Amino acid sequence: MHLSEHPLISASAIQRRVDELGAEIAAHYGDEPITLIVVLKGGLPFAADLLRAIPVSDVCVEYIRARSYAGTASTGEVLITMQPEESLEGRHAIVVEDILDTGRTASAIQARILALGPLSCAVCALLDKPARREVPIEADFTGFVIENYFVVGYGLDLDERFRGLPAVFVLEEAEEPEPAFLMDDEEPPAAPESEAPFPWPEEEVAGEETPGAISPADPGSGQTGGTPSPGTASGPPPPHRARARRRRRPRPPFR
Ligand code: XMP
Ligand code: MG
């Protein structure tokens, strides 16, 4: 896995949208007291910026903590491990989330907050991945609707990494390894960005008609080969070589 070369959402696009959200929230609640319920840890940078973007004096901050993810896969189970300390009575709560994915976390948190008796409880999510929704919940305030990418940065993490990035990046699958069975002085064939560098002739891939083309790592494989050289992987060509080398780099839609 590696980060997309360009951010999906740039830092300046985030800041502009956060300012707009602050104005939307202020317009919606007027002078009513608000408590932002920051969903740790991912909602922290967003909430810090949002807090400063709401031009209303009576805005309090509380924290709640929920976990539902391990790596890039949701466990489907939501654990709430921290609760607001101050009373929410007479105040409008706004749950501040980094991202709405299946919706389970926001839904569980909203139910827990409503049980504490605020005037109302809204959800404000920086990102929304509606394609992944499993629980019927919509954010009342949404920063950006994105496709089903796994994203990191601006609070979002992969196993605690990348939270401090100022922009949001897509986590992409690793690219295919470089061709590992060329002649020492052979260049990989040029291929247009959008196309796979394949197919190559089957026999060349197998190395059977080009003695010396492969550095055999597996002496019993029946392949002939030359001297192994640095950077030349050994063994039969991996089966995934026949696949297209796809570039799944999304267009950066938010700048
Ligand atoms: P649910 O599925 O409950 O998930 O809506 C919400 C929580 O899951 C995490 N999440 C992500 N974290 N990149 C991340 O770094 C993602 O693309 C992503 N999708 C979901 C996140 O912590 C969120 O609060
Ligand atoms: Mg997370």
Image (spheres, rainbow, N blue to C red):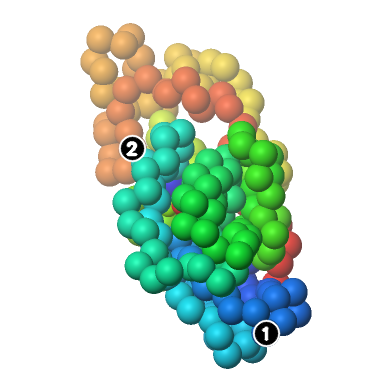
Upstream in the sequence, badge 1 or badge 2? Answer: 1
Between 50 and 253, the one nearer to me in the picture: 50
Residue found 56% across the figure and 72% down from its top: 91
Is residue 128 shown left or right of residue 86?
A: right
Rendered view: 232 above or below 142: above
Is residue 79 shown left or right of residue 138?
A: left
Residue found 71% across the figure and 67% down from its top: 254
Q: Which mark is residue 114?
A: none
Residue 64: x percent and y percent? 40, 60
| Residue type at numbered disc 1 | Asp
Residue found 32% across the figure and 43% down from its top: 231
Is residue 26 shown left or right of residue 73?
A: right
Q: Which quarter of the image is occupied by the C terminus?
A: bottom right
Which is more foreground, mark 1 or mark 2?
1
Q: Which mark is residue 31?
A: 1
Residue 195: x percent and y percent? 69, 39
Circle 2 SS class: loop
Does ligand 1 reach within 8 Å of label 2's beta carbon? no
Mark 1 crowdedness (10 Å alpha carbons): few <14, some 14-19, many ≥20: few
The image quadrant that residue 120 belongs to is bottom right
Q: Is residue 12 visible?
A: no
Residue 85: x percent and y percent? 35, 67
Rendered view: 196 above or below 239: below
Rendered view: 177 above or below 10: above
Residue found 72% across the figure and 82% down from its top: 30
Q: Is residue 30 visible?
A: yes
Alpha carbon of mark 1 to alpha carbon of mark 2: how far?
68 Å
**Number of marks in the image?**
2
Circle 1 SS class: loop
Q: Which mark is residue 232?
A: 2
Q: Residue furthest left?
A: 219
